[in-house]
Image (spheres, helix red, strand yellow):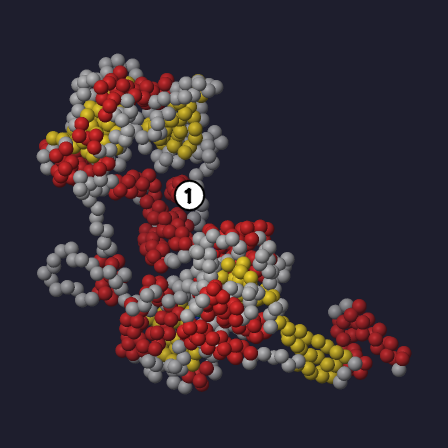
């Protein structure tokens, strides 16, 4: 804010009468060694609501000056000597130096100047000059200082709000004199805002209305039609004046008000610019809920249940810490703010109170180290510096224990079905507003094609592209990879190819169901496929193989690979190399919902496809669902494939280190991943050995933070026998199931629901992710109960064919006619009868 350029000054903090200076919002206090304490207390009381300046030139101990600034004093008027002692530790804009030397600094205070006009030369930019006025200032003295663009320090006892008190200087008149206008009607443009600075409306003031505002402490303006306008005099929507200030060049007033009633606007909204939104809207709603709530209001439940509110604040703070994508972080931060503000409103603390507190903290010159405390530091594995030296022996490693990365434990035998259900629940998918985000993106790409794709690449991937598509043949320089990587890709490619080729049923299937009735089935590739390769939190060339190789084996004619571009507009060379090897038609440099929309509808440069396959985040999955439901799009999808998950079953034969490594390999995918360990007949020390390995190995991982997030919602279930373990596994229907058990091959016979199974201690899940040959694009979230993972058939259609001879129609005709009659579909019946009649006639 730019204060009106005069500051009331007080000789002693005890003399402060806020009502006299309230409208200006600033005051200065002269401090001595004797009054440091009282002034500090006074700043603690008023410093949040008013700007406090302190004249400390008479203070001998500079540490007192630090204390005053730290408590919230805005600017300290200091001597050159004091400045020399403090300037290395405190920002220069917190000082004004008394004396001409002060011209070295952004601020200077010129003391006891009798002839203000001679000050012109030191009042030049860039220094702001505070001028201490003579003992008995006149209104003219103050106005002269303001005209010279200085700030006058005026002893408060000479100021008054009452324009009729001729023994003093009228604050209203000073404000009116201190501002300028270039309007021909001589009125002053006046912005009216609430205490948070949110604009309520634009009005005009005259000298008369300003003086009246100051006198009455309410909003009074100059209506161009009705003359002096006391806001709320007829509507009842009055305003309490908090403060008046001006803009930077003094030609626009700002009135900070506390608006009462329906709001500022004649349309009964808070502001002439429409109702509040964001935090102010939330605060308004919460305040309303506190007074009266509709039945069943959740907010009102929170107001009445302190424990619930406390638990929610902690839960949301934890979720905010583990969120990773921008979307998730905004989502969780909004939740934290909602519950926090509910706590504030419940305790009578307003948003402005919180903001004032933030400002106060920002003014501190001695910053706290900001280290995390006790249990919170320990949880994150941060070493806490001892604050006090305790003589008692240090507590056993409780804090360290809290920081352990460990899964919750449950004894399945003792748990009720409802408890098991709860324990095995996947982390809630935060997709409440996903369609609100995805629908406009899909619509934009559908209607504006490439232009929309380029905009989204800039927005979500920070990539500036000239074209959203790379067409084959791909330039060799785009697929430069080292030999070792190339060899790894080639080995994996070949294994995946072999396994998927073996799934082929290219032979025509033919069965003669009755003499002369031949039924066949033959296979055709889906002509055009779009393959989504995720690229948000990790680039996944392996997914390009898992989708591209079966598409190649199936013989799809058009293969479009979509993946988010890197911020320099390029795409990983491994992906380009694999695209080249599978014979892809094009690479679409797009991710998220926009990529799915482009594949579904086509754009100027992206071919439309018939089926979209591949995993992705919640935007990708929601967009796939959306386009597959649009009959106009004519596109299908593979399955809902979300965050990675694994279930490991371990018995006494299992190697704890192997088990832990398998759990962690999926836990590192994302904080929304989940890993489950089912132990079979293990005792405490055996389970402990696995848990130790989980913690130790996790702490050594580069993605330990992500692991900590996913392990937080992962569990160990203790069972007594393998049948119980398999029963639970089939209920969970994991994406990946790893069997670290004796006779693992036999146990595999008990598998009913799983995306992919890894049998025995020598089969880590990561071999399936990359190179064994099986597909890693698999159903998650329990969908393994009804979906298969991607396989050759995902890229094919099976077409059936019937071929009847005259003998055949004679044999089957009677049954057809009878059933058509039952269904009362006469034309169906006639289609057979007409042929049988013909055969009878020509026989
Ligand atoms: N089930 C499986 O077979 C399997 C296989 C591999 C990966 N996965 C999973 O796939 C997922 C990949 O997700 P990802 O995020 O890393 O990559 P992604 O490519 O799926 O998503 C990145 C894109 O999301 C879009 N996006 C991001 N924030 C957005 C926002 N706020 N609004 C609109 N769009 C936004 C952007 O367009 C960005 O390009 C992970 O959960 C991983 O576990 C699953
Ligand atoms: N495990 C993931 C499927 O859930 C696939 C993957 C790719 N790269 C590493 N892992
Ligand atoms: Zn993986």
Q: Count the numbered circles shown.
A: 1
* 213 vs 713: above or below: above
Assess disc 1: are there few (<14), some (14-19) or many (≥20) residues with their C-alpha within 10 Å of its C-alpha. Answer: few
Whether residue 406 is visible to the viewer of this picture, yes or no, is no
Question: In the rendered image, which quarter is residue 388 located in?
Answer: bottom left
Label 1 SS: helix
Q: Which residue is mark 1?
A: 278
**Would residue 371 appear left or right of 796 to someone viewing this image?**
left
Residue 28 in picture, x, y percent from top left = 21, 29
Report the front residue among 779 and 542.
542
Locate the C terminus and report the quarter of the image it occupies: bottom right
Q: Please name whichever residue, 360 or 295, is drawn nearer the observer in this view of the structure.
A: 360
Q: Is residue 166 visible?
A: yes
Q: Quadrant of the N terminus?
A: top left
Instruction: Answer above or below: position of 557 versus 458.
Output: below
Residue 240 lies in quadrant: top left
Single out the residue that lies furthest toward the top.
Answer: 166
- In percent of the image, x 37 and y 35: which residue is there? 197
In front of the other: 816 or 160 = 160
Residue at 38% over, 85% down: 742
List x then y, in percent, for residue 17. Answer: 22, 26
- The residue located at (80%, 68%) in the rendering is 827
Residue 572 image-quadrant placement: bottom left
Q: Work out which residue is located at the far right of the displayed protein and give it.
A: 841
State the image coordinates of residue 364 (x, y, percent, origin top left): 22, 42
User: Within 8 Å: ligand 1 and the Cβ of disc 1?
Assistant: no
597 on left or right of 328: right
Q: Residue at x 13, y 35 (%)?
A: 82
Q: Position of residue 129 (x, y in %)?
A: 24, 27
Ligand 2: give its quadrant.
bottom left
């Amino acid at each position: 804010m730019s204060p009106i350029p005069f500051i009331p000054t007080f000789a002693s903090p005890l003399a402060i009468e806020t009502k006299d200076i309230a409208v200006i919002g600033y005051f200065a206090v002269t401090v001595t060694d004797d009054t440091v304490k009282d002034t500090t207390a006074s700043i603690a009381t008023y410093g949040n609501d008013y700007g406090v300046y302190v004249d400390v030139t008479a203070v001998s101990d500079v540490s007192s000056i630090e204390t005053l600034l730290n408590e919230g004093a805005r600017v300290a008027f200091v001597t050159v000597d004091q400045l020399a002692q403090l300037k290395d530790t405190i920002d220069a804009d917190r000082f004004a130096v008394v004396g001409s030397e002060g011209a070295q600094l952004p601020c200077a205070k010129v003391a006891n100047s009798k002839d203000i006009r001679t000050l012109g030369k030191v009042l030049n930019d860039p220094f702001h000059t505070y001028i201490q006025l003579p003992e008995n200032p006149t209104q003219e003295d103050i106005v002269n200082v303001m005209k010279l663009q200085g700030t006058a320090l005026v002893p408060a006892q000479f100021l008054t709000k009452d324009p009729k008190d001729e023994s003093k200087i009228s604050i209203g008149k000073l404000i009116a004199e201190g501002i300028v206008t270039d309007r021909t009607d001589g009125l002053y443009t006046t912005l009216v805002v609430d205490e948070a600075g949110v604009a309520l409306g634009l009005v005009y003031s005259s000298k008369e209305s300003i003086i009246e505002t100051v006198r009455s402490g309410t909003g009074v303006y100059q209506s161009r039609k009705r003359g002096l306008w006391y806001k709320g005099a007829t509507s009842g929507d009055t305003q309490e004046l908090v403060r008046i200030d001006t803009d930077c060049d003094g030609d626009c007033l700002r009135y900070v008000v506390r608006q009462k009633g329906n709001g500022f606007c004649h349309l009964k909204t808070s502001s002439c610019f429409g109702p509040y939104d964001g935090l102010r809207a939330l605060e308004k709603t919460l305040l309303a809920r506190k007074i009266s709530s509709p039945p069943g209001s959740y907010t009102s439940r929170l107001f009445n249940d302190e424990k619930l509110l406390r638990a929610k604040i902690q839960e949301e703070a934890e979720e905010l810490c583990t969120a990773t994508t921008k979307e998730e972080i905004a989502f969780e931060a909004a939740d934290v703010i909602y519950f926090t503000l509910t706590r504030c409103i419940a305790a009578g603390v307003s948003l402005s109170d919180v903001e004032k507190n933030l400002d106060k903290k920002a003014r501190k010159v001695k910053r706290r180290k900001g280290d995390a405390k006790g249990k919170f530091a320990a949880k994150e594995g941060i070493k806490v510096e001892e604050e006090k030296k305790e003589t008692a022996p240090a507590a056993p490693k409780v804090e360290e224990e809290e920081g352990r990365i460990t899964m919750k434990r449950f004894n399945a035998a003792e748990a009720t079905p409802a408890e098991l259900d709860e324990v095995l629940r996947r982390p809630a998918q935060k997709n409440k507003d996903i369609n609100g985000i995805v629908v406009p993106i899909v619509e934009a790409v559908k209607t504006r094609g490439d232009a929309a794709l380029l905009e989204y690449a800039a927005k979500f991937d920070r990539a500036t592209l000239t074209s959203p598509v790379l067409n084959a043949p791909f330039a060799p320089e785009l697929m430069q990879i080292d030999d070792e990587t190339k060899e790894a890709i080639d080995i994996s490619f070949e294994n995946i190819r072999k396994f998927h080729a073996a799934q082929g049923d290219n032979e025509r299937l033919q069965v003669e169901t009755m003499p002369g009735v031949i039924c066949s089935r033959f296979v055709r590739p889906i002509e055009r496929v779009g393959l989504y390769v995720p690229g948000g939190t990790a680039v996944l060339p392996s997914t390009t193989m898992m989708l591209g190789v079966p598409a190649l084996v199936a013989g799809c004619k058009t293969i479009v690979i979509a993946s988010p571009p890197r911020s320099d507009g390029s795409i990983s060379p491994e992906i380009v190399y694999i695209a080249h090897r599978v014979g892809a038609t094009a690479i679409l440099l797009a991710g998220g919902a926009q990529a799915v929309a482009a594949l579904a509808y086509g754009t100027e440069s992206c071919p439309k496809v018939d089926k979209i396959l591949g995993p992705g985040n919640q935007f990708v999955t929601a967009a796939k669902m959306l386009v597959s439901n649009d009959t106009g799009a004519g596109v299908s999808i593979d399955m809902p494939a979300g965050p990675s998950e694994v279930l490991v079953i371990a018995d006494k034969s299992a190697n704890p280190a192997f088990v832990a490594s398998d759990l962690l390999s999926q836990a590192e995918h994302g904080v929304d991943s989940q890993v489950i360990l089912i132990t079979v007949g293990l005792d405490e020390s055996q389970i402990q050995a696995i848990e130790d390995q989980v913690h130790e190995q996790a702490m050594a991982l580069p993605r330990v933070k992500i692991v900590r997030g996913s392990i937080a919602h992962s569990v160990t279930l203790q069972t007594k026998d393998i049948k119980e373990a398999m029963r639970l596994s089939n209920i969970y229907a994991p994406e990946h199931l790893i069997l670290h058990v004796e006779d693992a091959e036999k146990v595999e016979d008990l598998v009913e629901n799983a995306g992919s199974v890894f049998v025995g201690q020598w089969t880590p899940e990561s071999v399936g992710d990359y190179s064994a040959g099986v597909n890693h694009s698999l159903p998650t979230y329990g969908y393994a109960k009804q979906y298969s993972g991607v396989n050759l058939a995902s890229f094919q259609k099976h077409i059936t064919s019937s071929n009847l001879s005259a003998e055949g129609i004679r044999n089957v005709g009677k049954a057809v006619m009878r059933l058509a009659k039952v269904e009362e579909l006469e034309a169906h019946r006639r289609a057979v009868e007409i042929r049988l009649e013909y055969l009878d006639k020509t026989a």
